[in-house]
Image (cartoon, rainbow, N blue to C red):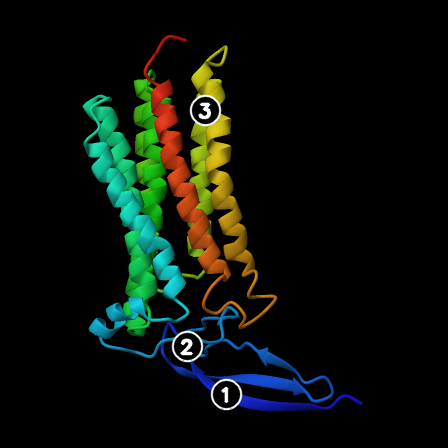
Amino acid sequence: MQRFKASIEKTYCAPCQSEIATVTVVNLNKSKKTKLLLTCTQCHTPLDYILTGYRPEMSWMDTFCSIFSIHNETCNVWTHVIPFFVAVALVGYESLNRERSISDTLVVITYCFTMAINFSFSSLYHLGNCKSKRAQQFLLKVDFTGILVLLWGSNIPMIYFGFSCEPTLRTVYFVISTFLVLSVWTTVMLPNIPGYLPLIIFICLVLFGWCQAINEYFVHDPPSPRSLLVPIVYAKSFSFYIVGVIFYASHFPERVWPGAFDFVGNSHNLWHIFVALGAFFQYWNVLVYQSQATNCTF
Protein backbone atom coordinates (compact mmCIF):
# COMPACT_ATOMS: atom_id res chain seq x y z
CA MET A 1 0.00 0.00 0.00
CA GLN A 2 1.41 3.39 -1.04
CA ARG A 3 1.72 6.02 1.69
CA PHE A 4 2.12 9.74 0.95
CA LYS A 5 2.82 12.85 2.99
CA ALA A 6 2.16 16.36 1.69
CA SER A 7 3.69 19.60 2.89
CA ILE A 8 3.10 23.21 1.84
CA GLU A 9 5.96 25.63 1.29
CA LYS A 10 5.84 29.35 0.63
CA THR A 11 7.77 31.03 -2.17
CA TYR A 12 7.49 34.15 -4.30
CA CYS A 13 6.45 34.74 -7.88
CA ALA A 14 9.37 36.53 -9.54
CA PRO A 15 7.34 38.76 -11.88
CA CYS A 16 4.87 40.17 -9.37
CA GLN A 17 6.53 39.30 -6.04
CA SER A 18 3.31 37.93 -4.58
CA GLU A 19 3.56 35.13 -2.07
CA ILE A 20 2.45 31.76 -3.42
CA ALA A 21 2.45 28.21 -2.15
CA THR A 22 3.95 25.06 -3.62
CA VAL A 23 2.99 21.58 -2.54
CA THR A 24 5.55 18.83 -2.01
CA VAL A 25 4.27 15.26 -2.06
CA VAL A 26 6.49 12.58 -0.54
CA ASN A 27 6.05 8.89 -1.30
CA LEU A 28 6.93 7.39 2.08
CA ASN A 29 7.49 3.95 0.56
CA LYS A 30 10.10 5.15 -1.93
CA SER A 31 11.25 8.38 -0.21
CA LYS A 32 10.56 10.13 -3.49
CA LYS A 33 9.57 13.79 -3.49
CA THR A 34 7.45 15.41 -6.17
CA LYS A 35 6.88 19.14 -6.12
CA LEU A 36 3.67 20.27 -7.75
CA LEU A 37 4.15 23.43 -9.77
CA LEU A 38 1.38 25.96 -9.43
CA THR A 39 0.50 29.15 -11.27
CA CYS A 40 0.57 32.53 -9.59
CA THR A 41 -3.00 33.67 -9.03
CA GLN A 42 -1.97 37.33 -9.12
CA CYS A 43 -0.34 37.57 -12.55
CA HIS A 44 -1.03 34.06 -13.87
CA THR A 45 2.64 33.46 -14.56
CA PRO A 46 3.72 29.80 -14.56
CA LEU A 47 6.77 28.94 -12.51
CA ASP A 48 8.16 27.08 -15.54
CA TYR A 49 9.78 24.39 -13.39
CA ILE A 50 12.33 26.78 -11.83
CA LEU A 51 11.83 26.20 -8.13
CA THR A 52 14.55 28.14 -6.31
CA GLY A 53 16.92 31.06 -6.65
CA TYR A 54 14.34 33.87 -6.90
CA ARG A 55 15.41 37.28 -5.62
CA PRO A 56 13.21 39.35 -3.31
CA GLU A 57 12.16 42.87 -4.24
CA MET A 58 15.20 45.12 -3.85
CA SER A 59 16.31 48.68 -4.46
CA TRP A 60 17.61 49.51 -7.92
CA MET A 61 21.17 49.63 -6.59
CA ASP A 62 20.89 46.19 -4.98
CA THR A 63 19.17 44.88 -8.10
CA PHE A 64 22.03 45.93 -10.36
CA CYS A 65 24.62 44.72 -7.85
CA SER A 66 22.96 41.29 -7.94
CA ILE A 67 24.69 40.77 -11.29
CA PHE A 68 27.63 39.53 -9.21
CA SER A 69 25.55 37.23 -6.99
CA ILE A 70 24.20 33.74 -7.62
CA HIS A 71 20.46 33.45 -8.41
CA ASN A 72 18.32 31.86 -11.09
CA GLU A 73 18.83 34.80 -13.46
CA THR A 74 22.63 35.01 -13.16
CA CYS A 75 23.28 32.74 -16.12
CA ASN A 76 20.59 34.47 -18.20
CA VAL A 77 22.28 37.82 -17.54
CA TRP A 78 25.86 36.78 -18.28
CA THR A 79 25.02 34.73 -21.37
CA HIS A 80 24.11 38.06 -22.98
CA VAL A 81 26.41 40.46 -21.10
CA ILE A 82 29.49 38.74 -22.54
CA PRO A 83 28.11 38.75 -26.13
CA PHE A 84 27.22 42.42 -25.64
CA PHE A 85 30.88 43.34 -25.09
CA VAL A 86 31.89 41.19 -28.07
CA ALA A 87 29.31 42.99 -30.25
CA VAL A 88 30.58 46.40 -29.07
CA ALA A 89 34.13 45.31 -29.91
CA LEU A 90 32.95 44.33 -33.41
CA VAL A 91 31.39 47.78 -33.85
CA GLY A 92 34.76 49.33 -33.04
CA TYR A 93 36.63 46.88 -35.27
CA GLU A 94 34.34 47.46 -38.27
CA SER A 95 34.53 51.24 -37.76
CA LEU A 96 38.26 51.02 -38.44
CA ASN A 97 37.82 48.85 -41.54
CA ARG A 98 39.00 50.67 -44.67
CA GLU A 99 38.69 47.78 -47.13
CA ARG A 100 35.01 48.43 -47.99
CA SER A 101 33.02 51.38 -49.18
CA ILE A 102 31.57 53.65 -46.52
CA SER A 103 28.01 52.47 -47.24
CA ASP A 104 28.98 48.79 -46.99
CA THR A 105 30.82 49.41 -43.72
CA LEU A 106 27.84 51.29 -42.27
CA VAL A 107 25.55 48.34 -43.06
CA VAL A 108 27.88 45.89 -41.29
CA ILE A 109 28.24 48.26 -38.33
CA THR A 110 24.45 48.59 -38.17
CA TYR A 111 24.09 44.85 -37.77
CA CYS A 112 26.76 44.69 -35.05
CA PHE A 113 25.05 47.59 -33.26
CA THR A 114 21.67 45.82 -33.34
CA MET A 115 23.36 42.79 -31.79
CA ALA A 116 24.68 44.95 -28.97
CA ILE A 117 21.22 46.48 -28.43
CA ASN A 118 19.55 43.07 -28.23
CA PHE A 119 22.10 41.64 -25.80
CA SER A 120 22.02 44.72 -23.57
CA PHE A 121 18.20 44.90 -23.47
CA SER A 122 17.95 41.19 -22.67
CA SER A 123 20.52 41.49 -19.88
CA LEU A 124 18.69 44.47 -18.38
CA TYR A 125 15.42 42.54 -18.31
CA HIS A 126 16.84 39.48 -16.61
CA LEU A 127 18.79 41.59 -14.14
CA GLY A 128 15.96 43.96 -13.21
CA ASN A 129 12.83 41.81 -13.41
CA CYS A 130 12.81 41.24 -9.65
CA LYS A 131 12.50 44.95 -8.83
CA SER A 132 8.69 45.10 -8.96
CA LYS A 133 5.78 44.00 -11.09
CA ARG A 134 5.74 47.37 -12.85
CA ALA A 135 9.48 47.22 -13.55
CA GLN A 136 9.19 43.63 -14.77
CA GLN A 137 6.45 44.55 -17.25
CA PHE A 138 8.39 47.55 -18.56
CA LEU A 139 11.66 45.63 -18.90
CA LEU A 140 9.84 42.80 -20.66
CA LYS A 141 8.78 45.29 -23.34
CA VAL A 142 12.40 46.46 -23.53
CA ASP A 143 13.50 42.84 -24.00
CA PHE A 144 10.95 42.29 -26.79
CA THR A 145 12.13 45.52 -28.42
CA GLY A 146 15.68 44.17 -28.42
CA ILE A 147 14.51 40.99 -30.16
CA LEU A 148 12.80 43.04 -32.85
CA VAL A 149 15.85 45.27 -33.32
CA LEU A 150 18.09 42.22 -33.82
CA LEU A 151 15.69 40.62 -36.31
CA TRP A 152 15.46 43.88 -38.24
CA GLY A 153 19.23 44.22 -38.14
CA SER A 154 19.65 40.65 -39.39
CA ASN A 155 17.48 41.37 -42.42
CA ILE A 156 19.02 44.71 -43.40
CA PRO A 157 22.49 43.53 -44.57
CA MET A 158 21.01 40.50 -46.33
CA ILE A 159 18.63 42.79 -48.24
CA TYR A 160 21.29 45.42 -48.92
CA PHE A 161 23.93 43.00 -50.21
CA GLY A 162 21.52 40.39 -51.59
CA PHE A 163 19.71 42.88 -53.84
CA SER A 164 22.70 45.15 -54.50
CA CYS A 165 21.97 45.01 -58.25
CA GLU A 166 18.19 45.31 -57.88
CA PRO A 167 17.66 48.71 -56.18
CA THR A 168 13.88 48.61 -56.58
CA LEU A 169 13.53 45.20 -54.91
CA ARG A 170 15.98 46.30 -52.24
CA THR A 171 13.89 49.36 -51.43
CA VAL A 172 10.68 47.31 -51.35
CA TYR A 173 12.16 44.80 -48.91
CA PHE A 174 13.64 47.57 -46.74
CA VAL A 175 10.21 49.18 -46.45
CA ILE A 176 8.37 45.89 -45.80
CA SER A 177 10.90 44.76 -43.18
CA THR A 178 10.80 48.08 -41.33
CA PHE A 179 7.00 48.26 -41.52
CA LEU A 180 6.62 44.72 -40.11
CA VAL A 181 9.01 45.40 -37.24
CA LEU A 182 7.35 48.71 -36.34
CA SER A 183 3.90 47.05 -36.50
CA VAL A 184 4.95 44.28 -34.17
CA TRP A 185 6.71 46.75 -31.87
CA THR A 186 3.45 48.71 -31.57
CA THR A 187 1.73 45.48 -30.50
CA VAL A 188 4.49 44.77 -27.99
CA MET A 189 3.93 48.15 -26.36
CA LEU A 190 0.34 47.22 -25.55
CA PRO A 191 -0.43 46.20 -21.94
CA ASN A 192 -0.72 42.57 -20.85
CA ILE A 193 1.57 40.95 -23.40
CA PRO A 194 0.95 37.18 -23.69
CA GLY A 195 3.94 35.08 -22.65
CA TYR A 196 4.07 33.32 -26.03
CA LEU A 197 4.32 36.59 -28.00
CA PRO A 198 8.15 36.68 -28.30
CA LEU A 199 8.15 33.21 -29.82
CA ILE A 200 5.51 34.20 -32.40
CA ILE A 201 7.42 37.42 -33.20
CA PHE A 202 10.60 35.46 -33.71
CA ILE A 203 9.03 32.86 -35.99
CA CYS A 204 7.13 35.38 -38.18
CA LEU A 205 10.11 37.63 -38.83
CA VAL A 206 12.37 34.65 -39.48
CA LEU A 207 9.86 33.44 -42.09
CA PHE A 208 9.96 36.89 -43.68
CA GLY A 209 13.73 36.56 -43.95
CA TRP A 210 13.29 33.27 -45.76
CA CYS A 211 10.77 34.88 -48.14
CA GLN A 212 13.35 37.43 -49.26
CA ALA A 213 15.96 34.68 -49.54
CA ILE A 214 13.70 32.62 -51.81
CA ASN A 215 12.92 35.74 -53.85
CA GLU A 216 16.61 36.41 -54.35
CA TYR A 217 17.23 32.81 -55.38
CA PHE A 218 14.62 32.97 -58.15
CA VAL A 219 15.20 36.55 -59.27
CA HIS A 220 17.97 35.45 -61.65
CA ASP A 221 17.73 32.95 -64.48
CA PRO A 222 20.03 31.11 -64.42
CA PRO A 223 20.83 31.53 -60.67
CA SER A 224 23.98 33.51 -59.97
CA PRO A 225 26.78 32.17 -57.73
CA ARG A 226 25.59 34.63 -55.07
CA SER A 227 21.96 33.50 -55.20
CA LEU A 228 23.09 29.86 -54.98
CA LEU A 229 24.74 30.83 -51.70
CA VAL A 230 21.45 32.08 -50.23
CA PRO A 231 19.93 28.81 -48.88
CA ILE A 232 23.26 27.71 -47.42
CA VAL A 233 23.84 31.03 -45.66
CA TYR A 234 20.33 31.17 -44.19
CA ALA A 235 20.22 27.49 -43.19
CA LYS A 236 23.50 27.67 -41.29
CA SER A 237 22.58 30.83 -39.39
CA PHE A 238 18.97 30.02 -38.55
CA SER A 239 19.78 26.45 -37.47
CA PHE A 240 21.14 27.95 -34.24
CA TYR A 241 17.93 29.93 -33.74
CA ILE A 242 15.75 26.88 -34.45
CA VAL A 243 17.57 24.80 -31.83
CA GLY A 244 17.22 27.68 -29.36
CA VAL A 245 13.48 27.98 -30.07
CA ILE A 246 13.05 24.24 -29.42
CA PHE A 247 14.61 24.60 -25.97
CA TYR A 248 12.64 27.80 -25.27
CA ALA A 249 9.27 26.28 -26.19
CA SER A 250 9.78 22.84 -24.65
CA HIS A 251 11.25 23.99 -21.30
CA PHE A 252 13.72 21.13 -21.56
CA PRO A 253 15.56 20.00 -19.45
CA GLU A 254 13.88 21.57 -16.37
CA ARG A 255 10.50 20.16 -17.41
CA VAL A 256 11.92 16.65 -16.97
CA TRP A 257 14.01 17.40 -13.88
CA PRO A 258 12.29 20.28 -12.00
CA GLY A 259 14.65 22.10 -9.69
CA ALA A 260 17.82 20.50 -11.07
CA PHE A 261 18.56 23.37 -13.48
CA ASP A 262 17.39 26.37 -11.45
CA PHE A 263 20.75 28.14 -11.72
CA VAL A 264 22.58 26.75 -14.74
CA GLY A 265 21.60 24.76 -17.82
CA ASN A 266 17.87 25.46 -18.03
CA SER A 267 16.06 26.05 -21.32
CA HIS A 268 16.28 29.84 -21.14
CA ASN A 269 20.04 29.66 -20.58
CA LEU A 270 20.34 27.44 -23.65
CA TRP A 271 18.04 29.74 -25.64
CA HIS A 272 20.36 32.67 -24.85
CA ILE A 273 23.46 30.72 -25.87
CA PHE A 274 22.00 29.64 -29.21
CA VAL A 275 20.70 33.16 -29.94
CA ALA A 276 24.20 34.51 -29.34
CA LEU A 277 25.76 31.81 -31.53
CA GLY A 278 23.19 32.47 -34.27
CA ALA A 279 23.78 36.23 -34.10
CA PHE A 280 27.56 35.93 -34.40
CA PHE A 281 27.27 33.34 -37.16
CA GLN A 282 24.98 35.78 -38.97
CA TYR A 283 27.78 38.37 -38.68
CA TRP A 284 30.06 35.95 -40.51
CA ASN A 285 27.31 35.40 -43.10
CA VAL A 286 27.06 39.17 -43.62
CA LEU A 287 30.79 39.33 -44.38
CA VAL A 288 30.52 36.41 -46.83
CA TYR A 289 27.47 37.97 -48.45
CA GLN A 290 29.18 41.33 -48.79
CA SER A 291 32.17 39.73 -50.51
CA GLN A 292 29.81 38.15 -53.06
CA ALA A 293 27.81 41.33 -53.70
CA THR A 294 30.48 43.50 -55.25
CA ASN A 295 29.99 42.33 -58.83
CA CYS A 296 26.65 42.95 -60.54
CA THR A 297 27.49 40.92 -63.65
CA PHE A 298 25.50 37.69 -63.77
Q: Is residue 275 above or below residue 285?
A: below
Within 10 Å of the Cα at label 3, are there few (<14), some (14-19), or many (20+) other Cα atoms? some
Quadrant assignment for the C terminus: top left
User: At x 32% / y 52%, what residue is drawn?
Assistant: 82
Within 10 Å of the Cα at label 1, are there few (<14), some (14-19), or many (20+) other Cα atoms? few
The residue identified by callout 2 is: 13
Q: Residue 115: x, y in percent?
A: 31, 44
The residue identified by callout 1 is: 9
State the separation of the CA atoms marked 1 and 3.
56 Å
Amino acid type at image mark 3? Asn
In front of the other: 141 or 95? 95
Element assignment for label 2: loop
Element assignment for label 3: helix
The residue identified by callout 3 is: 215
Q: Is residue 163 above or below residue 249?
A: above
In front of the other: 295 or 269? 269
Question: Is residue 84 toward the left or the right of residue 12 in the image?
Answer: left
User: At x 49% / y 61%, what residue is drawn?
Assistant: 265
Residue 168 appears in the figure: yes
State the separation of the CA atoms marked 1 and 2.
13 Å
Element assignment for label 1: strand
Query: Which circle's residue, 2 or 3, is located before the other in the chain?
Result: 2
User: At x 46% / y 53%, what residue is drawn?
Assistant: 271
Quadrant assignment for the N terminus: bottom right
Q: Quadrant of residue 152?
A: top left
Front tag of 2 and 3: 2
